[in-house]
Image (spheres, rainbow, N blue to C red):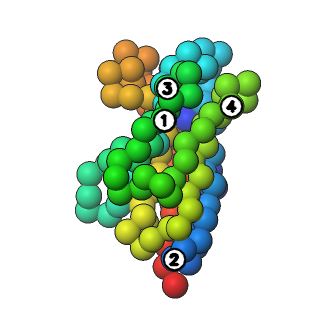
Amino acid sequence: QVQFVESGGGLVQPGGSLRLSCAASGRIFSIYAMNWYRQAPGKQRELVAAITSGGTTNYPDSVKGRFTISRDNAKNTVYLQMNSLKPEDTAVYYCNFPPALRTSLKASWGQGTQVTVSS
């Protein structure tokens, strides 16, 4: 079973930056796409960044131009660089596989990392 450990969250002022990390267990990490998600209080979990095994990235309009996803397959780690943060970016951030892959690999959710954007 694949497990994820997210880190790097914290309290930051509007306009600030944070870099999140997600360490994955398992030797086959490099061949799979990976996503970053977030869940704000009272809201559903939403996708904020995606990266394929080959490094192609995709973002929703809400974070495009501000967030950058990257991966280091040698370290089994995926990153999320977040710039120009806004109060509406406040949420718990998680990494995981895309939904179908998550099911087939029986990947559980990590504990997430809290990001709070506030002055």
Q: Which residue is mark 4?
A: 72
Residue density around tag 1, few if under 14, some if 14–19, many if 20 or more, within 10 Å: some
Report how far apart the C-alphas of labels 1 and 2 lie in the structure: 25 Å
Q: Nearer the viewer, mark 1 or mark 4?
A: 1
Task: Name the kind of residue labelled 3 in the image.
Answer: Thr
Report how far apart the C-alphas of labels 1 and 4 lie in the structure: 14 Å
Q: Earlier in the sequence, mark 4 or mark 2?
A: 2
Vertically, is 17 above or below 100? below
Task: Name the kind of residue labelled 2 in the image.
Answer: Pro
Vertically, is 66 above or below 52? below
Q: Which mark is residue 52?
A: 3
Return the residue found at the far bottom: 119
Q: Secondary structure at mark 2?
A: loop
Q: Which mark is residue 14?
A: 2
Q: Which residue is mark 1?
A: 57
Q: Earlier in the sequence, mark 1 or mark 2?
A: 2
Task: Name the kind of residue labelled 4 in the image.
Answer: Asp
Vertically, is 46 above or below 92? above
Residue density around tag 3, few if under 14, some if 14–19, many if 20 or more, within 10 Å: some
Task: Name the kind of residue labelled 1 in the image.
Answer: Thr
